[in-house]
Image (spheres, rainbow, N blue to C red):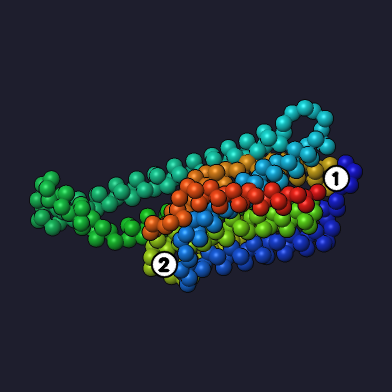
Amino acid sequence: MLGVPDLRAKSLILAKIWCLIVIFVATFVSGVSPYVLKWNEGFLVLGTQFAGGVFLGTAMMHFLSDANETFGDLTKKEYPFAFMLACAGYLLTMFADCLISSILVKSRGEADVEGQVAGAETGRANGNGVTSQSKYQGSAGTDHHLANPGLASVRSFGDTILLIIALCAHSVFEGLAIGVAETKEDAWKALWTICLHKIFAAIAMGIALLRMIPNRPLVSCAAYAFAFAISSPIGVAIGIILDATTQGHVADWIFAISMGLACGVFIYVSVNHLLAKGYVPQKPSKVDSSYFKFLAVLLGIGVIAVVMIWDT
C-alpha cells in the first residue's frame, strides 16, 4: 500500500509515550479527586452523556471508517470485515460484562446467605435457645449485621474489585487504539477522546467507591485509582510493541483489526454504560432530564463531526 507511515519512527513512538503519560496522570488525579473535592452532580450527569456522545461519534466516524478503508486497501474481497469486527468487539465486551455481572450476583447471594445464618445464630443466642419465627425475624432485621461486622466490608470489597476489573477491561482495549495509531495526529486525537471518557469515569468511580465504603482511607482510594489509571497505558504499550515488531502488510492488518474491534468496544461502552446508565445523582438535579441529556450527547457527537472535517 502506497504512503504507509513508518510505525517505528521515533517521533511517533515518543508521541504515544506522551499520550501514555498524559492519560495516566489525568485518570489518576480524577480518580482521587472525589476524596478531596465535592463535584457538582449536574456537571457529572451531563459530562457523562457528553463523553458518551464523543465515544459514539469516534467509534462510528473515526474507527469504523479507518478500519473499513484499510480493509479496502488490503483485500479485494467483497466482505464487510470492519463491520463484522465491530460486532465482534461489541459482543466480546458484552460477554465480559456478563461474566462480571454473574460473579457479582453470585458473591452477593453468598453474602446474603451468610448474613441470614449469622442473624439466626444471634437470634438463638439472644433468646437463650428460643428460636421462634418472630424472634428470628426480629433479630434478622436488626442484629445480623452486628453478628458479623466484617461481612459488609467484605461484600463492599468484592463489589469494588469487580467494579475495577470491569473498568480496566474496557480501558485496555481503549488504550490499544492509541498504541496502534499510524500517525501522531491520530494518536493525539484518540488521546483526547479517551481522556474525556476516562476523566468522567474516574470521577464517577471515585464517588462510587466512597459510597460503598464511606470511611475508605486515601491510600485505598489512590490504589484503586492507580489500577484504573494504568489500564489504558497498558493498552497503549501493547499497541506500541505490536507496531515495533511488525511493519508493512502485517502492521496494516493489525491496525485494521484493532480499529474494528475498538469500534465495537467504544459503541458498547457508549451505549450501555455512558448513555443508558450514565451517572445517577444522589439528590434530584434539574439537568437530570432526557432533554438536557440529549443536548449533551448531541454536542459530543457534533464535536467529533467537526473534528473529522480536518481528518485526512
Between the C-alphas of marks 2 and 1, the distance is: 50 Å
**Mark positioned earlier in the residue sequence (2 or 1):** 2
Q: Amino acid at mark 1?
A: Gly
Residue at the spot 24% in from the left edge and 60% down from the top edge: 146
Report the side of 176 relative to 125 (left or right). right
Specify the label residue 216 is tagged with: 2
Residue found at x 32% / y 61%: 150
Q: Quadrant of residue 213?
A: bottom left
- In this view, the residue in front, 13 or 54, is 54
Q: Which residue is mark 1?
A: 248
Question: Which of the 4 image quarters holds residue 258?
Answer: top right
33 vs 169: above or below: below
33 horizontally vs 21: left or right: left
The kind of residue tagged 2 is: Arg
The residue depicted at 68 percent of the width and 65 percent of the height is 21
Give how far across and how far down residue 142 sits, in percent. 20, 56
Q: Secondary structure at mark 1?
A: loop
Quadrant location of the N terminus in the rendered image: top right
Rate crowding at label 1 as few (under 14), some (14 to 19) or many (20 or more) other CA atoms within 10 Å. Answer: few
Please name whichever residue, 281 or 216, is drawn nearer the observer in this view of the structure: 281
